[in-house]
Amino acid sequence: MLLSGVLKIVGSGFEFILGIPALGGSIILALYWTPLLFMLVYHIITLVFSKNANKPIWGPVVGIIASTVGFIPGLGMMLHWAAFICLLIDGVLTITKSKEKVAQDVA
């Protein structure tokens, strides 16, 4: 399913912003940790879509871990970096495999 790949790539963009040392921390603190709660819900939704489409779920799982432990300053930043990388790779692979499957179905 193409939607799960798009959700993963969009989520990686959010994680990229939250992983920027001064900017991400400022956003999280200014909004009273609400972005972490939003990202937790977002990653759970992405996980459900990925699971229903039988796509890999490791990107959203890393995102869920980053959102739950993200309140710890140094560790949270590194986990947001890890979530960014995992979601980006997982999203690109999901979209690539979805396009290959569509091409095979057409042929």
Image (spheres, rainbow, N blue to C red):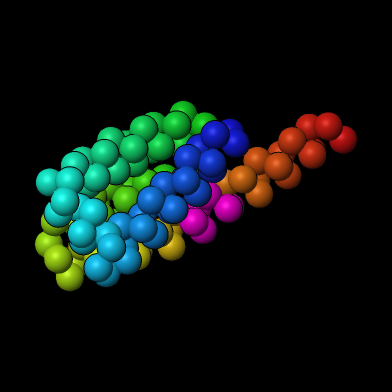
Q: Position of residue 31 (x, y in %)?
A: 17, 46
Give residue 34's position: percent from left, percent from top.
19, 42
Please state the extent of the stretch shown in magenta in the rendering. Answer: 88-93
**Quarter of the N terminus within the rendering:** top right
Left or right: 90 with respect to 84?
Answer: right
Q: Is residue 53 visible?
A: yes
Residue 92 in magenta stretch: yes
- Residue under the point 39% across and 59% down: 16
Q: Position of residue 48 (x, y in %)?
A: 39, 32
| In-front residue for pair 24/65 | 24
Residue at the extreme right: 107
**Residue farthest top in this picture:** 52
Q: Nearer the viewer, residue 48 or 10?
A: 10
Left/right placement of residue 55 relative to residue 97 reads left
Dominant SS in magenta: helix
Q: Is residue 74 left or right of residue 78?
A: left
Q: Quadrant of the C terminus?
A: top right
* Place of residue 43 in the rendered image (x, y in percent of width and height, measured from the top left): 34, 41
Q: Is residue 39 left or right of residue 8?
A: left
Q: Which quadrant of the figure has residue 18?
A: bottom left
Q: Does residue 83 appear in this view?
A: no
How many callouts does the rendering have? 0
At 34% from the left edge and 37% from the top edge, which residue is drawn? 42
